[in-house]
Image (spheres, rainbow, N blue to C red):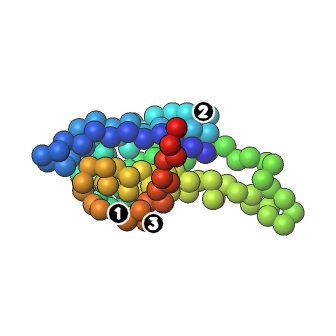
């Protein structure tokens, strides 16, 4: 499971003017979540918007979730399906942290963001 996210935020209003939410390998290949994008556009990057975007991703893709047999074992008959279904939630949360910091909406410490300092080329 992976994800790709983009938002453009109006600096004056701090509202999202454009958004892209793509989830890969959750359903059948990378797909945009139109519902999550609609939740984001016109909203501020706050906890309520994050919850709405996460719910929208699940509305768009939970029916397409493909169970993977290789993760099911005798010790773990349920496999990793429930864990894999929560990954987009974590990805969106991390993206919100990064976007809030980038647009000056909320100041997160480096330890909260988990920033890796770039190495010189």
Q: Is residue 55 visible?
A: no
Q: Which residue is situated farthest in the left direction here?
A: 12
Residue 75 placement, left or right of 8: right
Circles 1 and 3 in contact, beta carbons < 8 Å? no
Label 2 neighbour load within 10 Å: few <14, some 14-19, many 20+ = few
Q: Which residue is mark 1?
A: 108
Dot placed on the residue nearer the N-terminal end, 3 or 2: 2
Badge count = 3
Q: Which residue is mark 3?
A: 111
Q: Nearer the viewer, mark 1 or mark 2?
A: 1
Q: Tell me where residue 3 appears, x and y as whole percent.
A: 51, 42
Q: CA distance from mark 1 to mark 3?
A: 8 Å
Taking the spot 50% from the left edge, 54% from the top edge, the residue there is 116
58 and 48: which one is in front? 48
Q: Which mark is residue 29?
A: 2
Q: CA distance from mark 1 to mark 2?
A: 32 Å
Q: Is residue 98 visible?
A: yes
Q: Tell me where residue 38 appears, x and y as whole percent.
A: 31, 40
Q: CA distance from mark 3 to mark 2?
A: 33 Å
Give residue 107's quadrant in the image. Answer: bottom left
Q: Which residue is situated farthest in the front direction here?
A: 120
Dot placed on the residue nearer the N-terminal end, 1 or 2: 2
Q: Secondary structure at mark 2?
A: loop
Q: Tell me where residue 97 appears, x and y as whole percent.
A: 38, 56
Does residue 30 sit above or below 106 in this rendering? above
Q: Secondary structure at mark 1?
A: loop
């Amino acid at each position: 499971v992976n994800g790709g996210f983009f938002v453009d935020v109006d600096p004056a209003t701090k509202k999202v003017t454009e958004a892209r939410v793509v989830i890969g390998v959750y359903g059948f290949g990378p797909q945009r979540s139109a519902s999550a994008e609609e939740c984001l556009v016109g909203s501020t990057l706050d906890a309520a918007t994050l919850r709405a975007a996460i719910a929208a991703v699940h509305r768009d893709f939970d029916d397409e979730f493909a169970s993977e047999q290789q993760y099911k074992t005798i010790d773990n008959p349920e496999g990793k399906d429930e864990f894999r279904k929560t990954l987009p939630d974590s990805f969106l949360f991390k993206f919100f942290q990064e976007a809030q910091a980038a647009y000056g909406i909320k100041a997160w410490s480096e330890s909260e963001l988990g920033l890796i300092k770039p190495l010189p080329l």
